[in-house]
Amino acid sequence: MEIQTVQNSLNELYQELLAKNQKADNETQTTTQEMINLSKICLLPKQVLRNIFLFTDFYSDIPAISETCVLFNKLVRSRSFNISVYKIASQRTSRMKSTTINADALDKLEAQKLVKDNISRDEALLELKKANAVKDFLADKMKKQDKKIESLLEEIDKLNDQLRVQKQINSKTIAKVSVFETKFLEMKKQLEESNGAVERERAKHTLIIEELRNEITNYEKTLSELNQHKKVLRAEVLRLRGQYQNTLHQLGSYKDALYKMKSYFEAMFVPRIDELISEDDNNLNEKVC
């Protein structure tokens, strides 16, 4: 929250300085020109940075801290900022020179001078030692804080490097994902085309299967009719086979009767015929003689 507040203040001030700088490029600034209010960053720059680094969540506020540092760098290097600081310093000096000291102020200064003159040497040395001790303590603390800030800045640089590497990795990953998505879309398109071809082939095969089913139905119907005709023919064959057996039996009877008639004929008529033939032969011989 503190980073955001300081950053917003710096941003407003920097925009104001840019506007003043643009006006200064068009025409020379005068001493009567409206001065820029620097009360928002009266603790430039180390104390604000120290507050930012020491009283905020460092790791979660790295982008804001980095942006704030860049903004500070732009701000303190700008021409308008340096001109404004110089004008404020010159105005303070002129106000100090033009200030009149009245009689009461002179009496107070004289009294303070007398009090200071009455301080002993030992007391002055003691006060000086205390002041030096406080100064050394503050200087040591400031050094520690500066080292801590430097270490934090180094950590920021490392994290920025890691962030840069991560961005490169992310860009490569995004490129790979893009290539994969392109391949996936191509594969999806091919799959859809294959599915369409399969559906068309399935429709053709469905028609062929329906035709085959109709042919099978007709074949089964014809086969049923043929089976019925087969049964009729089988019955007719059995009937004819029975007639054939009867005919064979009658033929056997006829053969027996014929054989008997032949035997009877041979027994009764053949000798008589032979006699008649022999008589005819004898008569013929007699006529010849």
Image (cartoon, rainbow, N blue to C red):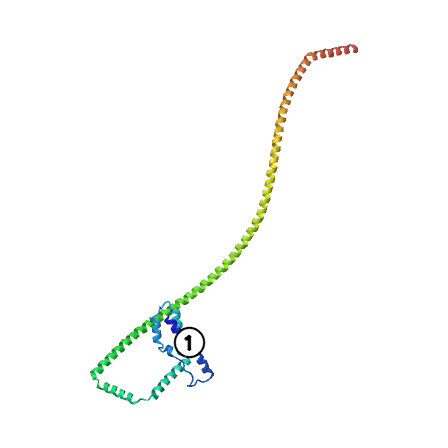
Quadrant holding the N terminus: bottom left
Residue 103 position by quadrant: bottom left
The residue drawn where x is 38% and y is 83% is 88
Element carrying mark 1? helix
Q: Position of residue 212 (x, y in %)?
A: 59, 43
Question: Is the residue marked by circle 1 packed among few (<14), some (14-19), or many (20+) residues within 10 Å?
Answer: few
Image quarter where the C terminus lies is top right
Side (left or right) of 21 relative to 190: left
- What residue is at 47 percent from the left and 61 percent from the top? 177
Q: From what the image shows, is residue 182 above or below residue 262?
A: below
Please name the amino acid that badge 1 sits on: Glu
Res 264 visible: yes
Q: Residue furthest front?
A: 104
Residue 166 in the image, given as x and y percentages of width and height: 41, 65
- Left or right placement of residue 187 versus residue 62 in this view: right
Q: Quadrant of residue 11?
A: bottom left
Q: Which residue is mark 1?
A: 12
In this rendering, does residue 289 appear at all?
Answer: no
Q: Position of residue 192 (x, y in %)?
A: 53, 55
Q: Is residue 192 above or below residue 239?
A: below
Q: Is residue 238 above or below residue 195?
A: above
Query: Would residue 20 be found to the left or right of residue 52 on screen?
Result: right
Residue at coordinates 60% horizontally, 36% vertically from top-left? 224
Q: Position of residue 82 (x, y in %)?
A: 39, 81
Q: Closest to the observer: 273 or 150? A: 150
Residue sitting nearer the eye, 3 or 149: 3
Identify the residue at horizontal 43%, vertical 64% (top origin). Answer: 170
